[in-house]
Image (tube, helix red, strand yellow):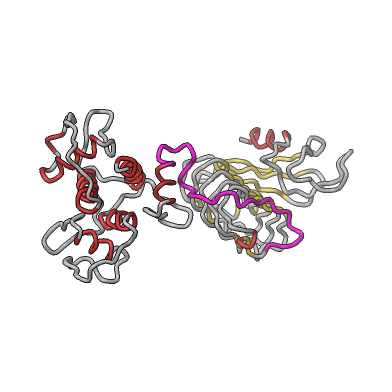
Amino acid sequence: MKNKIVSLFLAAAVTLSVSLTLPVIAGAEDNSLDYKTSRRLDDAEITDIAEGVTADGFDYWVFKIEGAPEIYAYVYYFGEDKDLVFPGKVAGYGVTEIAVWEKALTSIDVSACTELEYLEVYDNKLTSIDLSKNTKLEWLDLENNRLTSLDVSKNPNLHYIDVRGNYFASEADIIGLKDNTSLYFDPQNSGFFDVAADDWFAKFADFVVANGYMTGLGKFEFGPDAQMTRGMLATVLYSSAGKPAAPAANPFSDVSAEAWFANAVKWAFANGVVSGTSGTTFSPGDNITREQIAAILYKYAEKYLKIDVSSNAELTFTDKGDISDYAVNAVKWCVSKGIISGYPDGTFLPLNQATRAEVAAMLYRFDAAIK
């Protein structure tokens, strides 16, 4: 463990440096370690004090550098992805440095680390971080996370911030930023943080959002793996139709007038696009199944768009007998148009619940099929 950290210190890698005040080193231009440069610690004697692994799985190294008054406690994490609560002390010494690289952490708690000077959490999935207790913080590297705002108003000693690759709209999203702070910042990420350019569903997500058929679950979250509900799909088709006036009549007791999907459900029912799960219920929060999607898209094409839906494909799925009678013709039409397909193992899985990414793909193909 120690050898890893020593090599990182001495290799002067761009992605790792420490916030240490050093004695004058021969040939150095000043009395401090210049962050993210090729400055080395080769001429400084490092004295080990302690090293090990905490009960919570944090690796640590406590050491002293010749001539420096401080004792440094470096904590880093190589374990499984989970929300982390960092200890304030290791081996009896206050934690001064923390590093977590290339994990999938959505949350870390450093509130106990009141001696913290250096924090590096890059290539993770942080959406927020509380630094209000870290008043000694000097160096902050949060590259490639999912932050939309950052409050550094309680960090008077902070002189370096790197937040490139996050989701800030502007520098104004960094609260308490001081004029003398070196800031590495870009507002380049304007899309969804959970839709990468090489994801199989990327073009489908772009299509449905660009055309107003679907919106994100949040400003920067599309939610590709989230389940699609019946209320959601009704709203998607309502938006696709241009949100026409909805009738006042509401046949469903579980669709309140104030619900965000109310007009969509009333419109879809009035136009024969959807039906209820009973005579008086629509079940808007139920996850929609593949055969239900096929049936609804089929009815939308036939009843609302007045498209000929007579074409069909012979179903060869190994589980075609599991498709409900009401959905058979719809599935045949959707398959014939390339809107929906089966799985590599030859099944259709009609009762499988569809994700938002899968529905986006179906809507993309539906749009192409009806043109």
Magenta region, residue range: 177-203
Q: Is residue 61 left or right of residue 305?
A: right
Q: Is residue 289 visible?
A: no
Residue at point 66%, 65% (across, down): 176
Does the magenta-highlighted stretch encompass residue 77? Answer: no
Viewport quadrant of the C terminus: top left
Q: Residue at x 16, y 58 (%)?
A: 276
Residue 331 placement (x, y as % from top left): 19, 40
Q: Residue at x 45, y 52 (%)?
A: 221
Q: Position of residue 335 (x, y in %)?
A: 23, 36
Q: Which is nearer the eye, 106 or 212?
A: 212
Quadrant of res 29: top right
Q: Nearer the viewer, residue 54 or 151?
A: 151
* Spot occupied by residue 62 in the image (x, y as percentages of width and height): 66, 45
- Give the image location of residue 160, x and y in percent: 71, 53
Left or right, residue 135 beside residue 325: right
- Give whichever of 280, 78 is nearer the camera: 280
Quarter assignment of residue 39: top right
